[in-house]
Amino acid sequence: MDLGLRDRVYLVTGGSRGLGLAVAELLTAEGARVVITGRSDTVADTAASLGDGTTAVGLVADNADADAADRVVGTALRHFGRLDGALISVGGPPVGTAMDVQDEVWRDSFESTFLGALRIAKATARALKNGGSIAFVLSSSVRAPIPGLAVSNGLRPGLAMLAKTLTDELGRSGITVNGLLPAYINTGRQKELATLTGGKAPENALQRPGEPTEFARAAVFLLSPAAAYLTGVMLPVDGGALRVI
Ligand SMILES: NC(=O)c1ccc[n+]([C@@H]2O[C@H](COP(=O)([O-])OP(=O)(O)OC[C@H]3O[C@@H](n4cnc5c(N)ncnc54)[C@H](OP(=O)(O)O)[C@@H]3O)[C@@H](O)[C@H]2O)c1
């Protein structure tokens, strides 16, 4: 199946490592061009390593910053002359229980995880044409709480409903909006969280962790024209971990 990605242009925030980088790698391998972001200036070198060296641009941008959305969209339009979609990822929220997490941590996490994602989605949507696609990287915590990740459990379900709201608002313009609900995908973030699970095998049907490339295949499909009639979908990529349908 041809995903129809050749020459299309995507933003991938949080694209310098982990799930975002895996998606950027696959998008460029399929002939698309990308702007990837992260907070470290190593993002430029990472971008240069993608595709043929001209297919990716790296931009230092923190999703929490109010001007990040316009900067990243502007970079895509200036550099590639068009925009076809965005994968909105960011670092995972801090670990902590609902009883322990301080107000300041909630505020910071809201800025980067929630409001930052909304601003990027809005700026992207304004630049998209019919056929554009936005995908939010969320978490299985959208559907079931993860012990010790109160901030994720508190913010992700709201962001999923916001994505669903954008699905309705943007559908008439031919723009699709979806969410991905990863769990147990082998990234730096997942290694950090292994301290919470004591390094136990994933409690999912497949009884193994997922690889970033396995996540990327699902995400790239959702972003592609091949998925043009899928919108408002919250897709678990979790090896069957969620106990709800
Ligand atoms: N891996 C999983 O199984 C899993 C499960 C559930 C949910 N998730 C969620 O999926 C998202 C991505 O996870 P991951 O495993 O890919 O994490 P990761 O390996 O830690 O990668 C996070 C990426 O986001 C960038 N980043 C962090 N904070 C940022 C910010 N404020 N603004 C812009 N970029 C930022 C990081 O680069 P810099 O540090 O240089 O900024 C890096 O490129 C996270 O929100 C995580 O909670 C992942």
Image: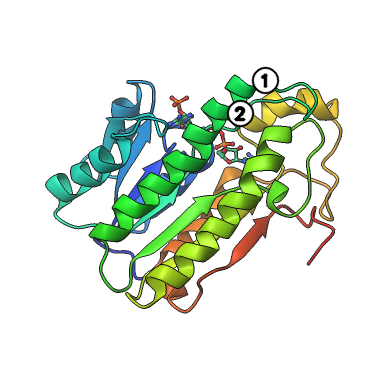
Q: Is residue 137 left or right of residue 224?
A: right
Name the image colouring: rainbow
| Kind of residue at disc 2 | Trp
Secondary structure of residue under mark 2: helix
Please determine whether, in this image, residue 236 is positioned above or below residue 19.
below
Residue 72 point in image, percent of width and height: 27, 41
The answer, for residue 214, to whether it is visible in the render is no
According to the picture, the residue beneath numbered tag 2 turns out to be: 106
Residue 181, x across and y down, in percent: 64, 53
Q: Quadrant of the N terminus?
A: bottom left
What amino acid type should be assigned to the residue bearing mark 1? Gln
**Label 1, residues with CA under 10 Å away: few <14, some 14-19, many ≥20:** few
Q: What distance separates the C-alpha of mark 1 from that of mark 2? A: 7 Å
Q: Cβ–Cβ below 8 Å for labels 1 and 2?
A: yes
Q: Secondary structure at mark 1?
A: loop
* 223 or 209, nearer to the observer: 223
Q: Residue at the location (36% across, 46% down)?
A: 120
Q: Residue at x 86, y 32 (%)?
A: 200
Numbered circles on residues, count: 2
- Tell me residue 132's x, y (percent): 33, 66
Image vertical order of residue 84 relative to residue 19, above or below: below
- Give the residue drawn at x 43%, y 62%: 223
Query: Residue 102 shows which numbered tag?
Result: 1
Quarter-of-image position of residue 94: top right
Which image quarter is the C terminus in? Answer: bottom right
Res 98 quadrant in image = top right
Q: Nearer the viewer, residue 77 or 158?
A: 158
Image coordinates of residue 80 in percent, x first then y, are 16, 51
Left or right position of 154 against 170? right
In this rendering, is residue 7 above or below 103?
Answer: below
- The answer, for residue 226, to whether it is visible in the render is yes
Q: Residue at x 43, y 51 (%)?
A: 87
